[in-house]
Image (tube, rainbow, N blue to C red):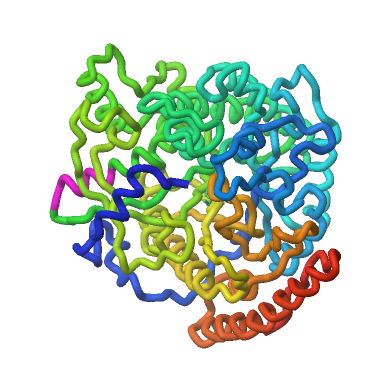
Amino acid sequence: MLPHCAASVCHVLVLVLHLSAAEDFDWTKNNHDSFYYGTFPAGFSWGAGSSAYQTEGAWDKDGKGLSIWDVFSHKKGKIQQNDTGDSSCEGYYKFKDDTTLMKELKLNHYRFSISWPRIIPTGVKTDHINEKGIKYYDELIDHLLENKITPIVTLYHWDLPQVLQEKYGGWQNISMINHFNEFANLCFERFGSRVKYWITFNNPWSVAVEGYETGEHAPGLRLRGTGAYRAAHHMIKAHAKVWHTYDTQWRGKQQGLVGISLSGDWGEPVDISSQKDIEAAERYVQFYLGWFATPVFHGDYPQVMKDFVGRKSVQQGLGTSRLPSFSPQEKSYIKGTCDFLGIGHFTTRYITHKGSPPGRSGTSYFTDRDLAELVDPRWPDPGSEWLYSVPWGFRRLLNFVKTQYGNPMIYVTENGVSEKMSCTELCDEWRIQYFKDYINEMLKAVRDGVNVKGYTAWSLLDKFEWDEGYSERFGLYYVDFRNKNKPRYPKASVQFYKRVISSNGFPNQREVENWRRKAVETCSSSNQLLAAARRESKEHAERPKVWPVHDEV
Ligand code: NOJ
């Protein structure tokens, strides 16, 4: 996610200005560093997440078709170390073990995605439905429900059937809308009696920008300045169509909800006394989250995107804007197609205005925004190069959603932090700190009146991290990928998150400190056990499948 040209700008430009940021809303008046002890409303849902390509493995088993990620990851030089998701965590075979881990954590929900080519191998429903794929998801859903874990199901977490890419150009082509709708309809038909939370798209920003603009992600296209806008346009329409399908055909019987999961970094003005920086920061968020959220809540793209892309298109001598437009009928069809909003949030940037004259730096989504991204060198940066821990940005983003989109129901669908470690490390104190502070900012946002109903830690397991392969680990559970059984081991953060869940928040300082201390104590013995298991596995191929979570602190 996001290691693009603008990200390199952030690493060069180092911020020395205004650490205490804008006091532009009442809720920002609080000291960033103050910790709020208190609990979430009763019924708040706690979960963890995964996605099909990142965890399932079994890429060519039981009749599954190829996805664009299978093909992309098999090309040399696309992924760190040429890793692939071929076997990944073997989640396809180990979902019962993983449900045990979820129970240990006392999760209320589990977020996973359905692989489209696993159930419709060519992507076209009338070609063939793969009943073995359906059976896998049937069993997973049933098993979760037997264990009182609510499934939150994503329909598209980036694994488009390869045939649709080859035949039509994937999301560049308008025909994806109908194919996706057919796939979604099949999912509603087969799973909808048991699944009540549906997410159409996960992070369409990333699909559009990294798949069709920078080419870092599958399908690897570099259609600068147009590809991302076109892909996004079709995804937004596809989302709306699926929402209407559910609304007219299934909602009455199934009583579920259909939302979309959008990712968004927060953008804070570098200089809060500069109107240009304030506007640039607003643009950053509008070009990110607003690109998708504004159509689904208000029926059209953010005005600032229309203005900026439109103006630059004219300057380039184009007859029409590179940003496509919606017809009046489409606007009213798309508006209001969101029963809940999924938010995936990891990090924040400082933003300053930076014009990019036409022709000089080439056309792209990034130059269309006329801004530069910066980071504070003091922000903790334990893992992925783009991921700095800036908890207060989370509260600001959630409040932005509340004010911009009429306080919709929100589920946080992704939040977490990675580590880049060559040695095994189960004592992830930095992750405990990240979760503690981000969840606390979410609690403050709830107190601000933001309608957050649930939180999904990203991710349950270490897994295939897209173009970074297995080099970045987001899991609460460590996965030993070198062992063919892919055993899971609890990191210290499991102990901590489990306490947050059972207390539904943070009761008081003494207890919360105690959780952290105990979590860190247990993990050093876990580390030794893992090291011993490693040594042993060199001698014996076999090893325990699942390591039980250490109990009561
Ligand atoms: C967002 C993506 O949806 C998810 O698949 C990925 O693991 C995280 N970002 C972290 O990069």
Q: Nearer the viewer, residue 208 or 384?
A: 384
Image coordinates for residue 481, horizontal then vertical, percent:
70, 58
Image coordinates for residue 312, horizontal then vertical, percent:
24, 25
Q: Is residue 259 visible?
A: no
Question: Which residue occupies 27% across, 12% down?
Answer: 319
Q: On screen, 24 above or below 430?
A: above
Q: Image check: 328 left or right of 127?
A: left
Residue 10 magenta = no
**Quadrant of residue 253 within the rendered picture:** top right
Q: Image check: 502 left or right of 407?
A: right
Residue 276 magenta = yes
User: Which region of the structure is painted magenta?
Assistant: 274-282
- The residue sitting at the top extreme is 319
Question: Which residue occupies 65% across, 51% down?
Answer: 50
Secondary structure, magenta segment, majority class: helix
Q: Quadrant of the C terminus?
A: bottom right
**Quadrant of residue 308 within the rendered picture:** top left
**Quadrant of residue 445 within the rendered picture:** bottom left
